[in-house]
Image: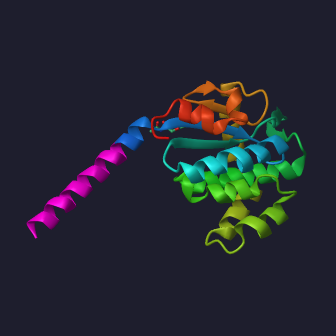
Amino acid sequence: MLLLFVSFVFIVSQHVTWGQLTRSKQVNVDVYVEAQCPFSTRFFANELMPFVRQFPHVMNLTIIPYGNTECHRIDGRVSCKCFHGPNECQLNQLMNCMIHRHPYIYDYLDTVVCIQGQPDLATAHRSCIAGKPDEWMLMKCARSRRGFRLHLKSGVKTLKTGVENVPWITVNGKYNKPSEYAFRREICGVSELC
Ligand SMILES: *[C@@H]1O[C@H](CO)[C@@H](O)[C@H](O)[C@H]1NC(C)=O
C-alpha cells in the first residue's frame, strides 16, 4: 500500500514537472495566413498539421487570418478588399470568429485548417462546421460586424508585424522564411522538446 502511494506521488510530481517544463520552453509561433492563398493551404496541410500531430505540446501557436487584405476608411466607413476577392474576406472572418471563440487553439485547429482553401462561406459551413454545437453562432459571426471587426484586429497585428506575403511565420518573434518548407527542422532547432 505504501509502495503504491509512493509511486503515485512520484508519477504526479513527474507529471507536474513535465507540465511546467513544457510551458516554460514552448516555442512562440505566429502564422499569418489568408483563406484562399494556396501557399497558406499547402503550409497548413504539409507542414503545420503533421508537426502538431507528432509534437502536440511544443508550440504556443497563434494563427492570424488577414494576409494581403487592404482596408480603407472611406467617408467614415471602413471597407476591406481581400486579395482573392469577397469570398476570401468571409472565410477570413469565419476563421477569426473561430479563433476568438475558442481560447485553446488545439481544440479547433482542425476546423481552421479545414476552412483554409474553401471556395466560399457556404461550402466552408457544409464541410467544416456543420453539426458543431456553435455552428450557427459562428456563421452569424462570420457574416456580421463582429466578424468584420475581428478581421480588422488581425489586420492591425499583421501590419504591425510587417507581413509582406503569406504564409508569414514568426518563431519566437522573428520572421522565419525557411520554416515555410522545413517547419519541423526550424522549430525543433530551437526546442528541446522534440
Ligand atoms: C503565446 O503567443 C501569443 C502570441 O504571440 C503571446 O501573446 C503570448 O504571450 C504567448 N504566451 C506565452 C505563454 O508565451
- Horizontal side, residue 129 vs residue 15: left or right: right
* Residue 145 in sight in this render: no
Q: Position of residue 141 (x, y in %)?
A: 70, 59
Q: Which color scheme is applied? A: rainbow
Asked whether 5 falls inside the magenta stretch, the response is yes
Query: 17 or 140, which lies in front?
Result: 17
Relative to residue 105, is residue 7 drawn left or right? left
| Residue in view at x 72 percent, y 35 percent | 180
In the foreground, 125 or 173: 173
Relative vertical location of residue 139 with respect to residue 10 in this rendering, above or below? below
The quadrant where residue 136 appears: bottom right
Indicate the position of residue 81 as horizontal and vertical percent values: 86, 40
Q: Residue furthest right?
A: 85
| Residue that protrudes farthest toward the front in the picture | 3
Q: Residue at x 82, y 60 (%)?
A: 121
Quarter of the image for the N terminus: give it: bottom left
Vertical relation: 69 (above or below) 138? above
Query: What residue is at 21 percent from the left and 62 percent from the top?
Result: 8
Considering the whole magenta stretch, tell me its main secondary structure. Answer: helix
Residue 89 shown left or right of residue 179 in the figure: right
* Residue 107 locus on image (x, y percent): 56, 59
- Magenta highlight on residue 14: yes
**Residue 130 in view:** yes
Q: How many marks?
A: 0
In magenta, the rendered stretch is 1-20
What residue sits 39% from the left and 37% below the top?
Answer: 24
Residue 145 x, y percent position in the rendering: 73, 52
Q: Residue furthest bottom?
A: 131
